[in-house]
């Protein structure tokens, strides 16, 4: 789902009540699954931020 569609859906209803066998499933903004950060829009923005911060720290260490 794209960001434009997400913005449209946010205006309609942001809370989905999904249940499985009577247990309500929580809606998360992001989740780490198999080492990859996945967000509600299936973007890799969070994953990219993780990699950038990780490699920035390594570059600072190497430059000193």
Image (cartoon, rainbow, N blue to C red):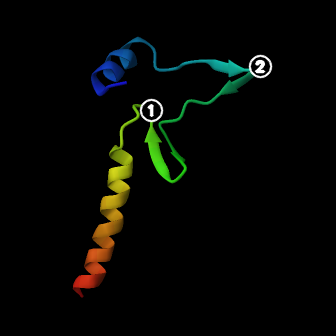
- For mark 1, give the secondary structure: loop
- Image quadrant where one finds the N terminus: top left
Measuring 38% from the left and 16% from the top, which residue is drawn there? 9
In the picture, residue 59 is in which quadrant?
bottom left
| Percent coordinates x, y for residue 51 in the rendering | 35, 59
37 on left or right of 54: right
**Of pointers 2 and 1, the one earlier in the residue sequence:** 2
Measuring 68% from the left and 20% from the top, which residue is drawn there? 19
Q: Which residue is outermost to the top?
A: 12
Residue count near mark 1 (Cα–Cα under 10 Å), binned few <14, some 14–19, many ≥20 = few
| Percent coordinates x, y for residue 50 in the rendering | 38, 57
In the picture, residue 24 is in which quadrant?
top right
- For mark 2, give the secondary structure: loop
56 on left or right of 19: left
Q: Which residue is outermost to the left?
A: 63
Depth check: give the residue in front, 13 or 38. 38
Image position of 33 with respect to 2: above or below: below
Residue at mark 2: 22
Query: Number of marks in the image?
Result: 2
In the picture, residue 26 is in which quadrant?
top right
Measuring 44% from the left and 32% from the top, which residue is drawn there? 40
- Image quadrant where one finds the C terminus: bottom left
Image position of 52 with respect to 46: above or below: below
Residue at mark 1: 40
Q: Which residue is outermost to the front?
A: 34
Residue count near mark 2 (Cα–Cα under 10 Å), binned few <14, some 14–19, many ≥20 = few
Image position of 57 with respect to 62: above or below: above
Alpha carbons under labels 2 and 1: distance apart: 23 Å
Measuring 47% from the left and 50% from the top, which residue is drawn there? 36
Depth check: give the residue in front, 28 or 45. 45
| Percent coordinates x, y for residue 14 in the rendering | 46, 20
């Amino acid at each position: 789902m794209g960001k434009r569609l997400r913005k449209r859906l946010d205006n309609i209803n942001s809370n989905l009540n999904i249940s499985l066998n009577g247990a309500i499933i929580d809606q998360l903004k992001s989740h780490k699954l198999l080492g990859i950060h996945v967000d509600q829009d299936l973007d890799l923005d969070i994953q990219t931020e993780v990699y950038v911060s990780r490699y920035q720290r390594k570059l600072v260490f190497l430059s000193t």
